[in-house]
Image (cartoon, rainbow, N blue to C red):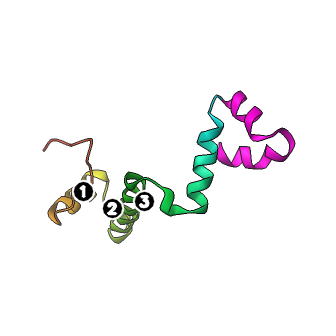
Amino acid sequence: MIAFIDDHRCVHGVGPICRVLGIAPSTYHAFKAVERDPDRASDRARQDRLDMAAIKEAFDDSRGRYGARKVWHQFRRKGHDIARLARWSG
């Protein structure tokens, strides 16, 4: 959605596009502000970005053989609880 708004904002403006898409213009502007200055991101968003990079690295290190469960167990063995909200049983 952000790319679409970027592509058409010169013709229609951010406000009208957001109104048609059903999002607040402040959502677009907040996203662009974080894009310009990553330090403006929330602590959770910054941690998620680091976690995603670590998960991708673990997946790549396994040459694509590990699924979500094995990657999760690998992080648990290292003492890093990456799944804060959803927990698998077992």
| Left or right of 54 on screen, residue 79 | left
- Amino acid type shown at disc 2: Arg
Residue 39 image position (x, y, % from top left):
48, 62
| Marks 2 and 1, how far apart at CA | 9 Å
| Marks 3 and 2, how far apart at CA | 22 Å
Name the quadrant of the N terminus. Answer: top right
Residue that label 1 marks:
70
Depth check, mark 3 against mark 2: the one in front is 3
Q: Which mark is residue 12?
A: none
| Left or right of 25 on screen, residue 60 | left
Residue that label 2 marks:
65
Which residues are the magenta region? 1-21
Dot 2 and dot 1 residues touching (CB under 8 Å):
yes
- Amino acid type shown at disc 3: Arg
**Is residue 11 found inside the magenta-colored segment of the image?**
yes
| Marks 1 and 3, how far apart at CA | 20 Å
Question: Toward the viewer: 74 or 29?
Answer: 29
Residue 51 image position (x, y, % from top left):
35, 60
- Magenta segment main secondary structure: helix
